[in-house]
Image (spheres, coloured by chain):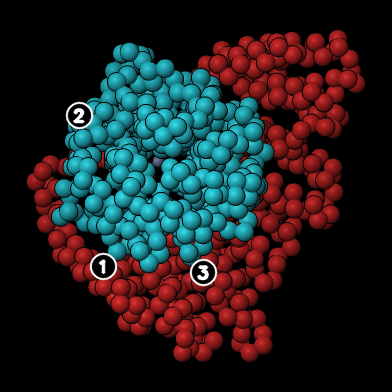
Chain colours: A red, B cyan
Amino acid sequence: MHGARRTRQTPEAIAARKQREQSKLKDYLSLTEDVIARRKKSDWSKDSFDLTTRVLQINPEFYTVWNYRRNIMSYGLFVESSPESINDLLSDDLSMTTMALKAHPKVYWIWNHRRWCLENVPDGPGDSHDWKKANWNRELAVVEKMLDADARNFHAWNYRRYVLANMPERRPEAAELAYTTRKIEANFSNFSAWHQRSKVYTSLWESGQLNREKSIRDELELVKNAMYTDPNDQSAWLYHRWLIGSGNDREILESEITAIEELLEEQPDSKWCIESLVHYKRLLIKNHSAEFGAEQTKGLLSQCVSFLLQLQTLDPPRRNMYQDIVDTLSAT
Amino acid sequence: MAASETQLYVDKHVAYIKSLGDNKDDLTYHMTAHLRMNAIYWGLTALCIMGHKEALDREEMIDFVMSCWDDEAGGFGAHPDHDAHLLATTSAIQILVTHDALDRVDKARVARLVILSLQQPSGVFAGDSFGEIDTRFSYCAVNSLSLLGCLSDLDVEKTVSYIRACRNYDGGFGNCIGAETHAGQVFVCVAALAILDRLDEVDHETLGWWLAERQLPNGGLNGRPEKLEDVCYSFWCLSAMSILDKLSWIDSDKLISFVLSAQDSEGGGIADRPGDMVDVFHTHFGIAGLSLLGYPGLIDLDPVYCMPAHIIEAMGLRKGWKALPRRKT
Ligand SMILES: [Zn+2]
């Protein structure tokens, strides 16, 4: 159970609650008994289908009943149905699970059932793909509502990626970039949106739709904004690390180090500034020390060590981590 | 021990876990039937770690597990008459191993026809025949196959290649390709790789850093950046850190205090965070985490299998993880 506050109940209060729940409990038990018995008999009737609706409305976590519901459709309701009524049935199920998700946004089984429905929507009507297109297009609107309610819900983000990758009429990926911009501008600390952005960019670069160097320069500007807005927010710093990557581009690495040093002057105790400087200076040593020689390498190393010592006082819970890195650096 | 005023209320937690089966007149008890097998595994493991394995009746528990066998699908459901699922099957195997009763199942059948049949062409595992995929299920499969002694039937490279594809630049793993890093998925992926002797797939320093950054000022750990701390996420980070030998990278005193503060000192049990309702899931992960942190008086937990360490050791399955030394007081 997550986020449910504890209340101290007297034995009398517990007994009274149980008394109140008696009839609910009796109803639930007879419903589940009925549904399990029908399932055992491979009863694929509409009547049993309606029964699964009632059980799942009370308990959407009852995965066996979701399975039974799908089997009723596959082996019963679909068998004698026209494509049109199959489409109607599945559209109804999509609506029903939209309601269920509003009340239970983190129940895996509901999200799964939705995928199954979506994948089984017939093409039609006729030779067109309109049913399929309509249903898949609607999914994006649904998942956007879910992300409006909780912008970090990873079920919703996973589902979003799944829909975008599989919808019959693909949306241009640039549209997804715009979506993550909106999410990030609404809240800089939404790491899920930053993450999505990193995936979209990777794909846009791989397909040659965007120029990697140019995007990285643009992104460094955006992330700098976030870093200046709240230097303690991890999301922007993590994304910044992704942009720098393995640090092969010496020019970017050095200009970012300078930019972070400027921010550090304004925020002399910013752990994330110092931590990132250590990381980027280490990358500079690792990738480029052959270019600038032993003396400068020594200087960078000693800067890293003194930053790491400072971090041990600034961020005591992780002091052993900083010390371990000092030891690694001393060994090189 | 730090100047913490609280202690672990072992007797209360034992009583709480024992009482869980007595709530059959409670609606919540029946509404959570789909988790029964997992709940028994959580309760049993927590009891073992507290040194009170005998608090629940062995025969009764084994009978329950066997009554959840789904012969048609081949596999265990979460409850009698519930469909077989890899999550319940893994818990069932863990319970049987803990009670040294694995001879009750046809190991080869479970391994080949059930677990291995769930592997997808991409290398990931599905939870059941309906095909939901998740790296959690890869871990369940690897863990179960290892406990069944059938790991040699697994296509290791194929399994590892999917996990590798889920790795993100922060060193962590998501539940499928493209997904955000999440502490729970980090645990399942790292533990699966540990069982397969493939920890070379992990960027130890980067992931260790990401995990250490989960610790918040109140001592608890969150599961993703800029989220709230939680006892269960604390465990998932801890187990991965102990597998990577990075437990010293966080403040263990503060984390112990956080877990202890999430206890219900009257009714027993541990919650997700202080002041919330307890449940057996967080009770188990709280106690399991305390064991890894060296809390005095507890039995060693194996973070790879999330079972008592002596059992895994006796089976010859121990990997090179490191917990903090057991404290005397
Ligand atoms: Zn939790």
Question: Are discs 2 and 3 less than 8 Å apart at CB?
Answer: no
What's the residue at 14%, 61% (across, down)? A22
User: Is B29 on the left or on the right of B112, as rendered?
Assistant: left
Height in image: A99 above or below A207?
below
> Which residue matches tag 2?
B11
Q: Nearer the viewer, residue A158 or B118?
A: B118
Q: In the visual, does A195 lie left or right of A145?
A: right
Residue A105 visible, this orientation: no
Who is closer to the viewer here, A219 or B6? B6
Residue A32: assigned label: 1
On the image, which quarter does residue B27 sit in?
Answer: bottom left
Quadrant where the C terminus of chain B is found in the figure? top left
Residue A138, given in percent of the width and then of the height, sits at 57, 70
Q: CA distance from mark 2 to mark 1?
A: 35 Å
- Is the residue under label 1 in contact with that under label 2 (CB below 8 Å)? no
Q: Amino acid at mark 1?
A: Thr
Q: Amino acid at mark 3?
A: Trp
- Residue at left 80%, top 29%? A253
Q: Which image quarter: residue B16?
A: top left
- Residue A116 badge: 3
Residue lying at 20% horizontally and 48% vertically, measured from the top left: B60
- Name the quadrant of the N terminus of chain B: top left
Pointer 2 indicates a residue of which chain?
B
Q: CA distance from mark 1 to mark 3?
A: 23 Å
Marks 2 and 1: same chain?
Answer: no
The chain to which mark 3 is attached is: A
